[in-house]
Amino acid sequence: MKRISKTSLLHKYPIALGIFVFLVISGLQYFTVKDYELKKRNEEQYVNEYSLLIEKQINAALSNSIAITRVLEFLEKKDSVTFDEFVIVSKDFLETNTFIDAIQLVEQGRIKFTYPLEGNEAAIGFDILNDPVAKGGALMTIERKKLYFAGPIHLKQGGLGIIGRRPIFKNDVFWGFAAVIIKLDSFLLAQKFDNPDRSNFYVQLSSINKETGEEEFFLPKSPKSYDGYKKTVFMRDGDWKLSIQLKKSTAFQEVYPFLFIRIFLSIILGYMTYHIARTPSILTKLLEERSREIKESNERFEYVTQATSDGIWDWDLQTGKVYRTPIFERLFGYRLEMYQDSMKFWWSLLELDELKKLQQELNNFFQSNQQNWEAQYKVRTAEGKFAYVLEKGIVIRDKESKPLRLIGAVVDVTESKVAEMKLIHLSEELANRAKKLEVSNEELEQFAYIASHDLQEPLRMVTGFLNRLEMKYSNVLDEKAKEYIYYATDGAKRMRQVILDLLTYSRIGTSTEESKVIVVEQAIREVIKLNKSLIDETSAQISWNELPKIKIQETPFVQLLQNLIGNAIKYRRSELNPEIHIASYENELEWIFEVADNGIGIEEDYLEKIFIIFQKLHPKSEYEGSGIGLAICKKIIDRFGGKIWVESKVNHGSKFIFTIPKKLN
């Protein structure tokens, strides 16, 4: 029992067990850390040993400088050194110390002797104590009273060099220096610093400039940055700093694979332990979730069947049993148990012809590879009425495509079916009306043509006889009779013009002319050409801005412009020449045109009435016209699907504005 209790406890807290195993295995990283620390110490030791070697090489190279300067100091103190003695001593020393380039003897700051003289002539007589560059190192040497290396500095004889000076005191009084010159290139070559790219170390020699306080570097600075251990050593015989750095630390790279492997193993073993420990609880939880899902699914199905107006059914094709939801009882009025045993009762609700058709469609469906079933038919309700239903379902088949179950839903579509039938009837009625309207329009157009023709004939006869009467009996008729004849003739002419205008008005919209792209400016020029006599007679000025190209029926558009421009000229002010300006602009949907004039204007009360047929604002004695021109303009614009209106003030001119859609119906 105790063992079972422990096992149950582990299964109860699998994540704790997994974390425990992970931590135990992760403890092995202690050895990784120790290994890393050891490798870092080895790298530090490696750098320390190399820096010690470099330091020894430099000290060994400079120790020879100590020897020669001491010899020269000894000889000068014992007895002043002659030039020949200086040459002999210097020559022997340089033959055995090739990295030293020159030896000098300096008296009171001035260079007295130098060997070799060739190439160093410029240095003879140079006073280093008065030179701002060399003075600092020289004074430091005097102060320390021992050999001191300064540089690198620019040499008097040319090039960069390191100068080691030993002060010479005679009877404790400063006499001068014994000096060695080591050119920088020779020094670097002697220390094998000339090829740093092949070395594992980055080496740098530097010193602080006494004048500027800035650090000066003897070796070329590397553009790269290094991450290895770095050690700095200060040289005792000069204010030099030796820096040695390992270019690349490999300690972490060497332990990284082991670090990764141990972390990976910790995670894998911890997860495996957790997964194994939680398996029983997973199965238990999964079983509970599945049971809960099944329960929720059943509840959801029950709620859906109650909430929806669809009758859901499940037909087992192997046993013939059918399950139907309680909605069927509400939809069709029969008790639910009457539906459940088989399809027999349901099929009895169909008319015989429709039943045969439905059963044939079902057989064809089962024999096919289709999955979705759909049918529409009508059934008899308990009230004795017929209800139209839409049935949709899905078939479940076995591996051989044999149908096993058919599951679906039935929707009462009686209302929509009735509405559909009404809509069909209405569509047929509208089509008939459209047909009748088309015939009526044709008859009306024919009537208008015949009427206008028949009406014009008697008017022509009246006008003709009146003209003949006036010509034949002019010497007999008095002025009153002639006036009557004039009124009768003029009335007949106006009547004929009204008939022509009415005919034009009735024909608007009946044109079969195709729309095409026209240049509006050319249309205006066509109108000007048609009205040239009137324009010349009234001295009218017609101008326009840049106008577009539009797709439209050309003939009615030109007629529209002709009526508007003609009105602008007709209704002019007597004291002014007519000025007419046409402009246009556009938006996303339409073109907008403006025809502005400086004419007599229109009173505000008539701004809308002027577009009504036969609406005249002025008597015939002032302005001729039938009052139908603007009505024609409005009808043309209406046919194009646009709008037309006017902005005007009396004696300030008028602006007629109309729009034309970019996409004409």
Image (cartoon, helix red, strand yellow):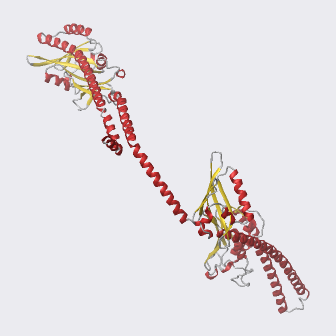
Where's residue 547, x and y in %? 66, 62
Residue furthest right in the image: 472
- Residue 205, image x and y in percent? 27, 24
User: Which sits in the foreground, 460 or 489?
Assistant: 460
The number of discs equals 0
For this orientation, the residue located farthest to the front is: 1
In terms of image quadrants, where is residue 418? bottom right
Q: Residue at 28% across / 14% down in the picture?
A: 99
Q: In the picture, residue 193 is in which quadrant?
A: top left
Q: Foreground residue, 577 or 29?
A: 29
Position of residue 632 relative to residue 165, above or below, is below
Q: Is residue 244 visible?
A: no
Left or right of 446 in this view: 386: left
- Location of the C terminus by quadrant is bottom right
Q: As drawn, is 365 to the left or to the right of 512?
A: left
Estimate the x, y position of residue 430 in percent, counting from the top left.
Answer: 73, 72
Which quarter shows the N terminus?
Answer: top left
In front: 226, or 655? 226
Above or below, comparing residue 473 to residue 157 in the picture: below
State the residue in front, 241 or 548. 241
Residue 415, position as x, y percentages in the image: 65, 70
In this view, 518 is above or below 452: above
Q: Is residue 127 left or right of residue 414?
A: left
Which residue lies at the image location 81% right of the left edge and 87% below the top edge? 487
Q: Is residue 612 visible?
A: yes
